[in-house]
Structures are given as C-alpha cells and as structure tokens.
Amino acid sequence: MAEILIVEDEISINELIRRNLNLTGHHCTQAFDGLSAIDFLENGKFDLLVLDIMLPGMDGYQVFERALGTPTIFLTAKSELTDKLKGLAMGADDYLTKPFQMLELAARVEAVLRRTKKVETKFTLGDMQCDFDGHQIFLKGTEIECTPKEYELLEVLIRNRNIALSREKLLDMVWGYDFEGGTRTVDVHIQRLRHKLHLENYIKTVYKLGYRLEV
C-alpha cells in the first residue's frame, strides 16, 4: 500500500481518483488547491503525488517545486506538447491528459511505484500468496506451477483488485492487442486460476462484462 496525495480542484475528479486508488489498496489524502497541497507535503510523507497543473492559488508546477522529490504524475486538461515537455523537464515521472480512463491512471501509478520501489512485492489472499519479484505463486506455502499467462492474468487482477475488468480489457492487458484468439481464452484461464489457487470465492464473474478480484 502506498501513501498518495491527490491534488485536484475538481471535487468529482478528485473523489473518483481517490475511490479507485483506494480500491486497489492505496491510502489517499486529498487536496483541492496548491496551498493546502504544500501544507500536506511539508507535514507528511507521501510515496506519490497525483498533481493537477491548473490549480487555484498556486499552480501544479509551483507545488511540484516544493514537493521535495516526491514521485509525481501530472494531470492536466492541456494537451499541448510544450506543457508536457515542461512537466517532464522539471523531473515529473509521468504525465496524463484529461479526460483519461481510471484503469490507465491506475496502471501509471503502479508503474511509477514499481520504478521507485514503493510497490508491494508480495500479495496474500486466503491461502494464496503471490511473489511479484520472483513471479511465483504459493498455496499454503507450496509453490504452484502456473503458465506465464496464468501468472500475468493473476497479477493484473491483483493490481486492479476490486475493479471490474472486461474480458476484452483483460485480453488486451495480458495477451496484447494483436492477439488473434477470442475472449474465451480469458474464461479458460480464469477457471484454471480459480481451481489451482482455490480462488472460487474471490474471482467474481461480473455479469455480461468480465471479472473482478474481490478483496
């Protein structure tokens, strides 16, 4: 679990980000303007800053200068290349232009946390434990043999836990957009994971959509 500071003046967007990152296991603090963000940064310790550029009182660039090296993902409605280059040149870790999908933000958050070594290295659910560094899966302490795709699918479900993922999205995230097989491939691999890892009560089928790892 990472400590994340969300700085976004649009309340609905801020709350949507918080809910989604909370679902994936992170703890979020919310700020709605630049000055309050500075106060949080000076009085707390955060693993990641999700920072809008257009803020009242003090813009995101000014907040970033006071962020004391906290890994940062910029959010902005601006799409001009100069704005993106400015943020990256200042040392930001990533840049996302509104509107964006929450799954994309969650993936970028995980990528930054992984690069900065702030992401979890193990995940336990019931009798199952997944070791991300070793790409190993254990059940009651015994390693379970899984194919590379079974492991990748499980990791995607874990990283996006409590979020409903369509079969098409899972197919794209695990097998790639150019995979020629159908979504039945996802169903087969889900059934294997449920059986092998005793996850029948955790991997839920979402009617007419796909699956969700419920934690």
Image (cartoon, rainbow, N blue to C red):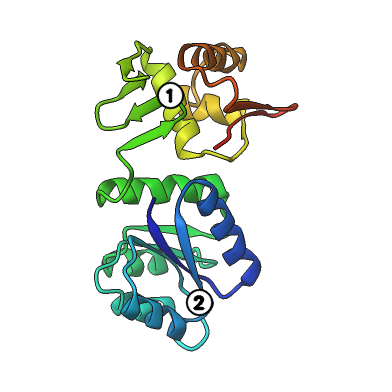
**Distance in Å between CA atoms under marks 1 and 2:** 46 Å
Indicate whether 58 appears above or below 201: below
Q: Residue furthest bottom?
A: 57
Position of residue 195 measured from the top left corner of the image (x, y, whole percent)? 52, 11
Q: Is residue 99 left or right of residue 88?
A: right
Query: Which disc, if any, is residue 159?
Result: none
The residue nearer to you, when weighing 8 against 19, is: 19
Query: Which disc, if any, is residue 127?
Result: 1
Other residues around mark 1 within 10 Å, as few (<14) / some (14–19) / many (≥20): few
Q: How many marks?
A: 2
Position of residue 11 measured from the top left corner of the image (x, y, whole percent)? 63, 71
Position of residue 88 measured from the top left corner of the image (x, y, whole percent)? 31, 63
Mark closer to the chain start, 1 or 2: 2
Q: Which residue is mark 2?
A: 54
Q: Is residue 46 left or right of residue 6?
A: left
Image point 61% across, 59% down: which residue? 16
Indicate whether 130 appears above or below 62: above
Image point 39% across, 83% down: which residue? 39
Amino acid type indicated by mark 1: Asp
Indicate whether 42 appears above or below 196: below
Closer to viewer: mark 1 or mark 2: 1
Amino acid type indicated by mark 2: Met
Image point 61% across, 13% down: which residue? 184
